[in-house]
Image: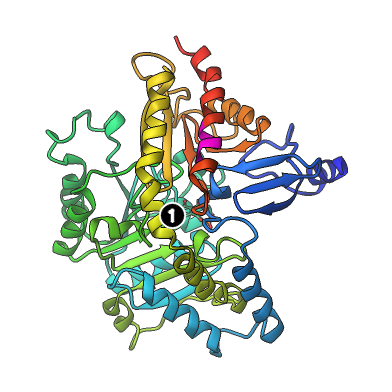
């Protein structure tokens, strides 16, 4: 079976890395919160793969929905409609914020964001600028990578799409404005009002309600309501990128619900199909939808609104309800927070613990001045650093944790029990000796 890894090196690209030295683990099966390699070794999935298999592995109801749809009608051109599309949209209407009333379906988070930018620019024409944060990730296609502020990701696209303007993030652990919350008066978000007015021609502001791959940055409570107010007052669309934060990850269907914020456009993917089939969703308000009554909706794909993908949405919603998963996540939120804060107490290399629901980061530091283990964002992506080595040690110990250059992202499937959470946290506790030893 080692042949599979070898053949993978020959025939496939390993993404976001140099190809030399790539020896991917050959995963043969998965169930619940665990997956298994070809030697029979079991791994606890402590990051739901890419913060995406929120219902866990091999969920029977979601698999059945895909299989039944495949037998009935696996594909029909977007020019036609079919019941599965309406069932998907109606299931979504039950869970998205009330402002979101109409949907465009694609095949990834990146495509969902591409559509959000295009629609905003059409609706707000001639305004075309889109504000996006420095520490952000919105996908790797041309428009989505241009929105992305994490410039380590731009290697292949140095000439990103024009019309993107940056604004700072509420990263209180190392405030980009060198201020302290709450004395700062939320200067980072109030600055957005100034940027919009100075730039003019701004069509939309895009925001990950909680920054995901760039370090699980949870904003202060007033942040998103203030951003909503600023965008409304300036007649600019508010796009919530809920590709990672949606589908119960925060204990609510969508993260904006935690702060009662209603976006004009909401994008999501990942948990929408439990990542079993490719799916992106761009949901819009009635105002955005109304614009296209008499204007060309100049967008579309062969694979849009794919029946196999759409069949998963009602099944996912029903599984959340059957297992009362939002309650489960809310119930265990403070337990995870407590256990992770204990790690901070006992490990000098843990500089910050932040998160909500089943979505947490441990930010690792290499000295008492809280210096990050990486020189993020300067160090190139794909050059392994100390935190990559920490994650590799965890994998050896049978626990998979997705990591950034200076942080671990702890985001177990929402079906994880308290005992399974303990299993992962115990392993991290043991592995942190590695970064503690590098601390000076
Ligand atoms: N937006 C956010 C917030 C993400 O976290 C991601 C992926 O991690 C994307 C967009 C891109 O999604 P995809 O990889 O499905 O294109």
User: Could you tell me residue 434's position as x and y percent?
Assistant: 56, 18
User: Could you tell me residue 188's position as x and y percent?
Assistant: 21, 41
Taking the view exactly as shown, the residue that stands out farthest to the front is 419
**What is the secondary structure assignment of the residue under circle 1?**
loop
Between 352 and 40, the one lying in front of the other is: 40
User: Could you tell me residue 234's position as x and y percent?
Assistant: 16, 62
Quadrant (top left, top right, bottom left, bottom right) of the N terminus: top right
Between 373 and 357, the one lying in front of the other is: 357
What secondary structure prevails in the magenta region? Answer: helix
Which region shows up in magenta?
Answer: 421-425
Residue 438 counted in the magenta span: no
What residue is shown at x 48% (from left), y 63% (from top)? 323
What residue is shown at x 53% (from left), y 44% (from top)? 47
Does residue 261 appear to the left or right of 119 in the view shown?
A: left
Residue identified by numbered label 1:
161
Disc 1 crowd, CA 10 A, few/some/many (<14, 14-19, 20+): few
Whether ligand 1 has any atom under 8 Å from the Cβ at mark 1 is answered as no
């Amino acid at each position: 079976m080692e042949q599979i890894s070898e053949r993978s090196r020959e025939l496939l690209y390993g993404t976001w890395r140099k190809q030399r030295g790539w020896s991917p683990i050959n995963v043969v099966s998965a169930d619940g919160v665990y997956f298994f390699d070809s030697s029979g070794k079991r791994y606890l999935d402590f990051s739901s793969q890419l913060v995406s298999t929120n219902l866990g592995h091999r969920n029977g109801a979601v698999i059945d929905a895909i299989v039944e749809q495949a037998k009935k009608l696996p594909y029909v051109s977007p020019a036609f409609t079919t019941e599965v599309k309406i069932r998907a949209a109606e299931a979504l209407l039950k869970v998205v914020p009330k402002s979101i009333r109409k949907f465009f379906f694609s095949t990834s988070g990146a495509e969902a964001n591409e559509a959000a930018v295009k629609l905003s620019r059409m609706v707000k024409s001639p305004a075309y600028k889109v504000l996006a944060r420095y520490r952000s990730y919105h996908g790797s296609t041309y428009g989505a990578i241009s929105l992305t502020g994490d410039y380590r990701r731009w290697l292949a696209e140095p000439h990103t799409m024009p019309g993107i303007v940056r604004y700072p993030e509420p990263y209180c652990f190392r405030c980009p404005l060198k201020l302290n919350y709450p004395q700062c008066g939320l200067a980072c978000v109030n600055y957005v009002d100034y940027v919009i007015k100075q730039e003019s021609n701004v069509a939309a502001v895009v925001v990950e309600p909680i920054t995901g791959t760039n370090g699980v940055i949870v904003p202060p409570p007033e942040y998103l309501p203030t951003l909503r107010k600023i965008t409304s007052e300036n007649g600019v669309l508010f796009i919530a990128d809920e590709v990672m934060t949606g589908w119960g990850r925060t204990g609510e269907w969508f993260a904006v619900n935690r702060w009662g914020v209603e976006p004009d456009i909401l994008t999501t993917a990942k948990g929408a199909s439990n990542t079993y089939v490719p799916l992106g969703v761009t949901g819009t308000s009635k105002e955005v939808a109304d614009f296209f009554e008499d204007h060309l909706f100049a967008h579309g794909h062969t694979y849009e609104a794919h029946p196999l993908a759409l069949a998963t949405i009602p099944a996912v919603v029903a599984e959340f309800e059957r297992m009362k998963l939002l309650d489960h996540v809310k119930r265990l939120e403070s337990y995870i927070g407590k256990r992770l804060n204990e790690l901070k107490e006992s490990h000098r290399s843990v500089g910050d613990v932040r998160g909500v629901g089943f979505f947490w980061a441990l930010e690792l530091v290499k000295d008492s001045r809280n210096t990050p283990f990486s020189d993020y964002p300067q160090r190139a992506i794909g050059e392994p650093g100390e935190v990559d080595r920490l994650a590799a040690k965890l994998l050896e110990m049978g626990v998979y944790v997705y990591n950034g250059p200076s942080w671990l992202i702890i985001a177990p499937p929402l079906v994880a029990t308290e005992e399974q959470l303990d299993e992962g946290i115990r392993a991290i506790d043991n592995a942190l000796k590695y970064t503690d030893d590098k601390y000076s």
